Image (cartoon, grey):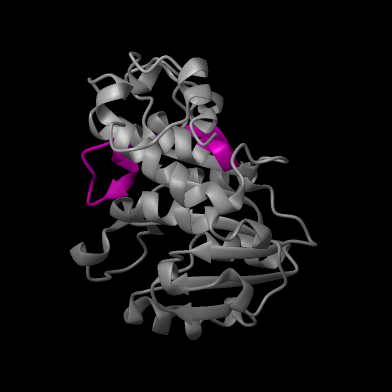
Amino acid sequence: MGLFILRKAHPFRKKWGQNFLTDTNLLDRIVRTVDPQKTDSILEIGPGDGSLTEKIFPNVNEMAAIEIDPLLIKHLSIRSDLKGLHIIQGDVLLQDIDDIPISNPVRVVGNIPYNITSPIIFWLIEQLDYWGDAFIMMQKEVGERLTAKVGTKSYSRLSVVVGVYLNVELCFTISPDVFYPKPKVDSVIIRFTKKANPIVPDDQYIKFNKIVRAAFSMRRKMLRNSLAGFDFTEKIKDEIDFTRRPETLTIEEFAKLLG
């Protein structure tokens, strides 16, 4: 779901998950939450027609915006008040932050299609060196999974893998009523910052991800069943009780499964 303010008719593109924001007060609240500074380099994902962009751009050092819709790219490029904005057309998941023509680390503001929320978060994790913090709008249910405590129903693979590298803060909830077309779900703004010391080393990330995915793929089963395909040392088996279910393990306990 991309976030735009509704000014004039723009064809709603279902394939890109576009929803248009109709509440300027909410835009102002987003800006206050991001709190842009004169020294900032901002990367905006999904600027739409520039409704949020125009409020941030004058107050920062430099800004780039990535947009997939060619009609919106055209609209942004002819706006005189956005002169100097670096506009990039394309799929954000195919971009490297280091290649974007502004200084890094950037601060990220993301109004994105909800069906690529998880890929966007993992895209951020893969590029930790190049950003400082990120404010992403997403479906409330996904936000609850990201901020879930161990042992709760919402605690999931996403909670664990993201929690290894990132601090996650729920900023505020947004009603469906402020969008057109109106989505069926509440939304939230989530702020991500990087952990000073990641719980899992970079070179173990792929293995860790596989273990956590396997554990949660059979959520109701004990670890000895869901992780039967992995060869764990006796030391690990002494430290972790494999009769437990995955939602009972803390992120640190999952990390111990790496040995």
Foreground pick, 227 / 25 = 227
> Residue drawn 68% across and 75% down?
102
Left or right, residue 37 beside residue 130: right
Left or right, residue 175 beside residue 238: left
User: Which region is colored magenta?
Assistant: 163-186
Residue 187 visible within the image = no
Q: Assign the N terminus to one quadrant of the image.
A: bottom left
> Residue drawn 62% across and 56% down?
128
Left or right, residue 101 beside residue 49: right
Q: Assign the C terminus to one quadrant of the image.
A: top right
Pinpoint residue 84: horizontal percent, then vertical percent. Answer: 65, 82
Foreground pick, 145 / 58 = 145
> Residue drawn 23% across and 20% down?
220
Foreground pick, 105 / 58 = 105
> Residue drawn 55% across and 46% down?
30
Q: Quadrant of residue 218?
A: top left
Tell how many labels: 0
Pinpoint residue 234: horizontal percent, then vertical percent. Answer: 48, 24
Up-down: is 174 above or below 137?
above
Pinpoint residue 3: horizontal percent, then vertical percent. Answer: 39, 56
Residue furthest to the front in view is 234
Is 178 colored magenta in this rendering? Answer: yes
Residue 188 visible within the image = yes
Pinpoint residue 242: horizontal percent, then vertical percent. Answer: 37, 18
